[in-house]
Image (cartoon, rainbow, N blue to C red):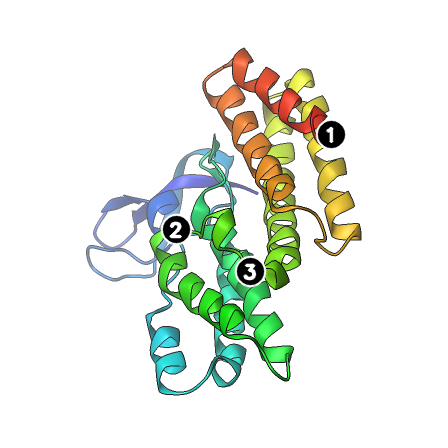
Amino acid sequence: MEIRGERECKECDHRWSYYETGSVSCPQCGSLRSVGVGDRARHTAMQVDLDLSAHRSAVGDGSIRDAAPALKSDLRDYIRKTGYIRGGELLPLEDTPLAAHELLHAVDVVARSNRPTDDEQLYVITLLRRADEGERPDTDAVPDSMTDARGLAYAEAIDAYCRDLSTWLDDNPNPEVRTTLETLSNHRKRVEALAGAVSLSESESLVEAARELHTALVDDDLDALASARDTLAALF
């Protein structure tokens, strides 16, 4: 949606950035009586932080299975609020939402299993420790039994990113990037149809292609666009 990026308090005349705060409440006096000012711009990135500290404590005091419902609820809320357009600016696909998507699926694997392995549980704990710091495990740290979870998680994260990227292209047309985006979307659909059952390298390639499209657009970088095409072509 398109919204005005600045708010002005009707009580004290203070102005602040809605894009940065995501709040209509005046940070100066606390009044809720404010109005939008300035030009409208496309905005999907809600102001949201991922804080998993309470869930780390819950797992430490109990088990992953016991902590899973509340953890999954908070992860879904974070994912729902995560967007990639801020005041008309296209944002990159960063590691935090990727890790959040993966943690959601990895927790589900462990919570559903009657006898989760030590490697699976350790992997969930590793994600839980790092996800809100913007870190995700390297491919060589992913247990074989978690490969599909990562594949499906990344496909879902890329789907969300592609939807915002497509919206951004509606306002900033680029036929060549649009064509490559469609190719990326087709690969993503294939991964979802396979329930994530693709190699870890393919999952990483899709993330890389999404990031290269962002670079191609924001930096007007034709080499990045060519690299995205090559990355996707190598998957056939």
The residue sitting at 58% across, 77% down in the picture is 116
Q: Amino acid at mark 3?
A: Pro
Q: Amino acid at mark 2?
A: Glu
Mark before the other along the chain sequence, 1 or 2: 2
Mark before the other along the chain sequence, 3 or 2: 2
Check disc 1 and report its element: helix, strand or loop: helix
Question: How many other residues sit within 10 Å of disc 1, few (<14), some (14-19) or many (≥20)?
Answer: some
Mark on residue 118? none
Of the residues tagged 1 and 3, which is closer to the observer? Answer: 3
Name the image quarter holding residue 227. Answer: top right
Question: How many other residues sit within 10 Å of disc 2, few (<14), some (14-19) or many (≥20)?
Answer: some
The residue sitting at 50% across, 14% down in the picture is 221
- Residue 215 in percent (x, y) is at 49, 24
* Viewer-proximal residue among 189 and 92: 189
Quadrant containing the N terminus in the rendered view: top right
Mark before the other along the chain sequence, 1 or 3: 3
Check disc 2 and report its element: helix, strand or loop: loop
- Residue 193 in percent (x, y) is at 80, 51
Question: How many other residues sit within 10 Å of disc 3, few (<14), some (14-19) or many (≥20)?
Answer: few
Q: CA distance from mark 1 to mark 3?
A: 29 Å
Q: Which residue is mark 1?
A: 183
CB under 8 Å between callouts 1 and 3? no
Q: Amino acid at mark 1?
A: Thr
Mark on residue 143? 3
- Residue 160 in percent (x, y) is at 61, 46
Q: CA distance from mark 3 to mark 2?
A: 17 Å
Mark on residue 135? 2
Above or below: residue 191 compared with residue 50: above
Of the residues tagged 1 and 2, which is closer to the observer? Answer: 2
CB under 8 Å between callouts 1 and 2? no
